[in-house]
């Protein structure tokens, strides 16, 4: 009776607290016992302890690479959902869905499935738009991350392999984006496929065979969508899944993070927070933040409304048709190049599409091998863990700004049709002005940036 009376007089909150403490203590003891037994057999503690204390610097610019990583994770998650409803087929069906303007119209089954996914599947449109915005964030983050690495000299020895894998990731991201962009087979994506067909046909000697191989016959054929779908969900994601851990985790972990040259930092010293719990907590919160921002864009930012474009019809074309922003430079290069043809050894070479492809390929190759080119001219063979400010390397900074300016003019040229209609500028003078800007603007940007960077470096290094 006494024990019952004391129990009755004990407040309920204290009894609950005592029970939770007992259960929590038992769980903690069980967890420690399990961890101890695993450690006895695997010897993990000695290997993990220094890794968990590995220091990570804390600077906002390092988050650009993390945005790309988390956007890729969102792409995988939403893309898995979309594959349950998308049908990669070019068979012609009659649409009997919920959109009245297209009901009864013959269309490819791929386009019909995208319509139904967008307008009939619960949450389908939201998932499509999150997937599309995640692709935009993915490519934009990779571009921004590469520019940060370039302008701060983070590609220098011993990080050349990180630079090369980053360039490969950019190329794969562009290919993956184009594959996904083409799958709906609406009027806009079909125009992009028509452009690819023209580029393939412009390749000397083997162009016709390349086009036949991709389309399975005369454009548009009946196999290109299944082939693009296989590349989009299997081949390219597999390569990305292999390169992302190598670039973002393995190489960084082995070579350690680069750092900005602030006070108290040197080439052989790392300043930052430990991997656990500092970096784990920060990166988990940033993943949730990135996912939330992409979800907000997907919920409130309409993108790629395929029901407004209609199914692809090879005979139809629109001056306003434009690719996504990350392919604007390619479309702009084709618009600015005159349609010249030359005859060489009995073969007609279409310079209109061929020259832009060669120039862009050359620029991409120069970007890929730039770390080795700079090391050859500067003779710098030391290991560099401290970053540089852009003004510390004026020539490199000027080259980078000129490079960005060149592609910015091409990107602007991709909207020549819209500029013509909205600003009432005659098309021919507009094209000639953009051609002149393509040649003059990068040179002007190089000279101005070089002068400003040298002046900034001199002012910073001047005593007093």
Image: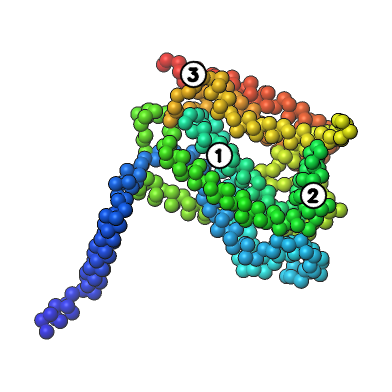
Q: Label 2 crowding class (10 Å Cα cut-off): few <14, some 14-19, many 20+?
A: some
Question: In which quarter of the view is residue 8 placed?
Answer: bottom left
Vertical position of residue 456 compared to residue 215: above or below:
above
Q: Is residue 36 visible?
A: yes
Residue at image x 59%, y 63%?
Answer: 81
Question: In which quarter of the view is residue 408 placed?
Answer: top right
Please identify, in this view, whether the residue under mark 1 or under mark 2 is nearer the observer: 2
Label annotation for residue 459: 3
Vertical position of residue 156 compared to residue 421: above or below:
above
Q: Is residue 298 visible?
A: no
The single residue placed furthest to the left in the displayed view is 2
Q: CA distance from mark 1 to mark 2?
A: 32 Å
Judging from the image, what secondary structure is the residue with disc 2 in? helix
Query: Residue under circle 2?
Result: 212
Please identify, in this view, whether the residue under mark 3 or under mark 2 is nearer the observer: 2
Question: Along the polypeptide, which appears first: circle 1 or circle 2?
Answer: 1
Q: Label 3 crowding class (10 Å Cα cut-off): few <14, some 14-19, many 20+?
A: few
Instruction: From the viewer's perspective, tell me whether residue 55 is left or right of residue 69.
Output: left
Instruction: From the viewer's perspective, tell me whether residue 383 is left or right of residue 136.
Output: left
Query: Residue under circle 1?
Result: 166
**Residue 71 percent coordinates (x, y):** 55, 50
Query: 275 or 118: which is nearer to us?
Result: 275
**Residue 91 percent coordinates (x, y):** 78, 64
Figure coloring = rainbow
Residue at image x 77%, y 30%?
Answer: 435
Question: Along the polypeptide, which appears first: circle 3 or circle 2?
Answer: 2
Query: 202 or 303: which is nearer to us?
Result: 202
Vertical position of residue 197 compared to residue 84: above or below:
above
Question: Along the polypeptide, which appears first: circle 1 or circle 3?
Answer: 1
Q: Label 1 crowding class (10 Å Cα cut-off): few <14, some 14-19, many 20+?
A: many
**Residue 385 percent coordinates (x, y):** 43, 30
Please identify, in this view, whether the residue under mark 1 or under mark 3 is nearer the observer: 1
């Amino acid at each position: 009776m006494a024990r019952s009376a004391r129990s009755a007089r004990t407040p309920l909150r204290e009894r609950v607290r005592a029970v939770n403490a007992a259960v929590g203590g038992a769980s903690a003891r069980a967890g420690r016992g399990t961890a101890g037994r695993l450690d006895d057999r695997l010897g993990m503690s000695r290997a993990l302890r220094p890794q968990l204390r590995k220091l990570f610097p804390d600077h906002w610019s390092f988050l650009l690479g993390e945005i790309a990583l988390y956007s890729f994770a969102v792409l995988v998650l939403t893309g898995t959902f979309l594959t349950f409803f998308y049908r990669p087929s070019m068979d012609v069906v009659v649409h009997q869905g919920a959109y009245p303007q297209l009901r009864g119209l013959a269309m490819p089954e791929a386009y019909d499935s995208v319509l139904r996914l967008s307008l009939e599947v619960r949450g389908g449109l939201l998932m499509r738009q999150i997937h599309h915005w995640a692709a935009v964030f993915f490519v934009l983050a990779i571009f921004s991350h590469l520019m940060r690495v370039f302008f701060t000299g983070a590609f220098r020895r011993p990080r050349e392999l990180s630079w090369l894998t980053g360039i490969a990731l950019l190329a794969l991201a562009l290919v993956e984006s184009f594959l996904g962009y083409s799958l709906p087979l609406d009027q806009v994506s079909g125009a992009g496929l028509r452009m690819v067909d023209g580029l393939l046909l412009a390749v000397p000697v083997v162009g016709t065979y390349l086009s036949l191989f991709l389309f399975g016959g005369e454009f548009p054929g009946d196999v290109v969508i299944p082939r693009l779908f296989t590349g989009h969900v299997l081949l390219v994601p597999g390569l990305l899944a292999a390169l992302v851990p190598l670039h973002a985790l393995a190489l960084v972990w082995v070579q350690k993070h680069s750092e900005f040259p602030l006070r108290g930092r040197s080439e052989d010293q790392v300043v930052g927070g430990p991997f656990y719990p500092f970096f784990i907590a920060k990166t988990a919160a940033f993943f949730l933040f990135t996912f939330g921002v992409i979800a907000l864009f997907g919920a409130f930012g309409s993108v790629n409304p395929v029901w407004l474009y209609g199914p692809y019809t090879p005979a139809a074309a629109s001056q306003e048709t434009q690719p996504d922003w990350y392919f604007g430079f390619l479309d702009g290069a084709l618009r600015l190049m005159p349609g010249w043809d030359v005859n060489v050894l009995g073969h007609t070479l279409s310079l209109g599409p061929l020259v832009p492809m060669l120039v862009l390929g050359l620029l991409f190759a120069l970007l890929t091998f730039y770390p080795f080119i700079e090391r050859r001219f500067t003779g710098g063979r030391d290991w560099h863990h401290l970053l540089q400010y852009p003004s510390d390397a004026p020539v490199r900074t000027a080259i980078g700004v000129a490079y960005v300016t060149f592609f910015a003019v091409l990107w602007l040229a991709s909207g020549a049709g819209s500029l013509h209609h909205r600003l009432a500028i005659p098309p021919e003078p507009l094209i000639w002005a953009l051609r002149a800007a393509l040649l003059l603007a990068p040179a002007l940007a190089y000279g101005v940036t070089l002068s400003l960077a040298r002046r900034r470096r001199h002012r910073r290094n001047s005593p007093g």
